[in-house]
Image (spheres, helix red, strand yellow):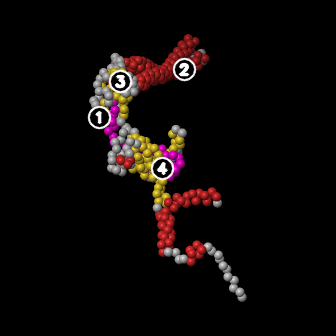
Amino acid sequence: MSEERDYEIRSDEVNDILSKTPSWMVRTGSLMMVAVLSLIVVGSAFFSYPDIISAPVIITSANLPANLIAKRSGRIQSIVAVDGTCIEKGVVIAMLENPASYRDYLKAKEICSQWSDSTTLLTEKLLLGDLQDPYNQLVKAFKEYREFLSIDYHRRMIGSVKRETEAKRGQIKSSQRREITAMEQFEIAESTFKRESTLYQQRAISLQEYEKSRSAFLSVKQLLEGIRDEVGRNRIEVIKGEQTILNLEMEREELLNAHLRAVESSLSTFMSRLSEWEQTHLFISPVDGMLTFTRYWQENQNVTAGDVVFTVIPLEEKRITGKLYIPTSGAGKVKPGQKINIKLDGYPFMEYGMVEVHVKSVSLLPASIGSERVYIVETEFPDGLRTNYAVDIDFAGEMHGTGEIITERASLLRRVFYPVKHIMNNNF
């Protein structure tokens, strides 16, 4: 059998490469490349990092200093509080010039705030400026109410009718006793008349004696009927008296309620006008705190509408909160408890550091801010504005910055396979 031999024709360069064993450097380099690639693949499976969602943040406080702003221009008529002192909510600090007397204002407010019944005394001569008309209406209504109670016409009439009704009841009892006696007399007269009638029919007595007996019987019968009529009339009078008492009580109740409604309506109108007047002419502390004068320090200074005249700093510790407005894309990754790094505007984070807080809550539905749809993330600052560089930043009422929300971690290898998974799901 002849042997067939295959001959491959190669170039001299290829023959040189194939006939020559690779050097140790090439072999070592190849192994190192494979090892490095293996380490990269294995490391990518273990190396993980989080996604960061950046969003603007607005930092505010639940108890900011309260600025008292002038509602109108005018001259400060009186200052009744002292700068730097602690005042309570509702305390009057100052009053702008107006026709009302501050003392009369306090007196009227105290009286109306403590009004309860007719024993309350309303002072008629008070200087209240714009409040004079509603106060006069209140005084008039209250005066009519007190006069109605003091005259007490209906109660007096009720007392009179009751006495008259009781007298009628007494007459009824007396008439009933007379009726019993008259009834006995009637029975005797009737018996006598019947006997005399029998005797007359038997011709035992004369006509004169018979008529005398009949006359006596009719007289007693008339007396009995008269007494019964009197009892009936008195009973009707008693019923009418009771009806009159009921009508008087109802009429009194209606008039009393009408006077009370007039007083309460006038009081409500006055208190409403008083509230408007206070907002226009007075500076009243809205919170408990320390009073601070700003640009105005003494009486007779002129203020302009819109000026901050006084400031009340709350005594309670500031509770600083923040709101981040994150875009809808990627909002599902944000969960309560995740870390937030906040970089404050005006405080470069390379120099001052970042404030580290955590997500408190995420809004259930997106909100429209301008033309964008965003989710609102709320957070709190339990340690104040203390950065990771141990720098305490003073809170300035409202501050802005950028928040970086650190979401869940994912490995590098997993992120590489995200697009592969997407392609396979869409094409297979």
Q: Which of marks 2 and 1 precedes in the sequence?
A: 1
Q: Position of residue 69 (x, y in %)?
A: 38, 29
**Residue 303, numbered circle:** 3
Label 3: which secondary element: strand
Query: Residue 297 colored magenta?
Result: no
Q: Which residue is mark 2?
A: 190
Query: Which residue: 56% across, 74% down?
Result: 17
Q: Residue furthest front?
A: 12
Label 2: which secondary element: helix
> Disc 4 and disc 1: Cα gap in Å?
44 Å
Q: Residue type at mark 3: give it.
A: Val
Q: Residue type at mark 1: give it.
A: Cys
Of 122 and 401, nearer the camera is 401
Q: Residue furthest bottom?
A: 1
How many discs mark residues in the rendered view?
Answer: 4
Q: Position of residue 134 (x, y in %)?
A: 41, 20
Range covered by the magenta-colored residues:
310-337
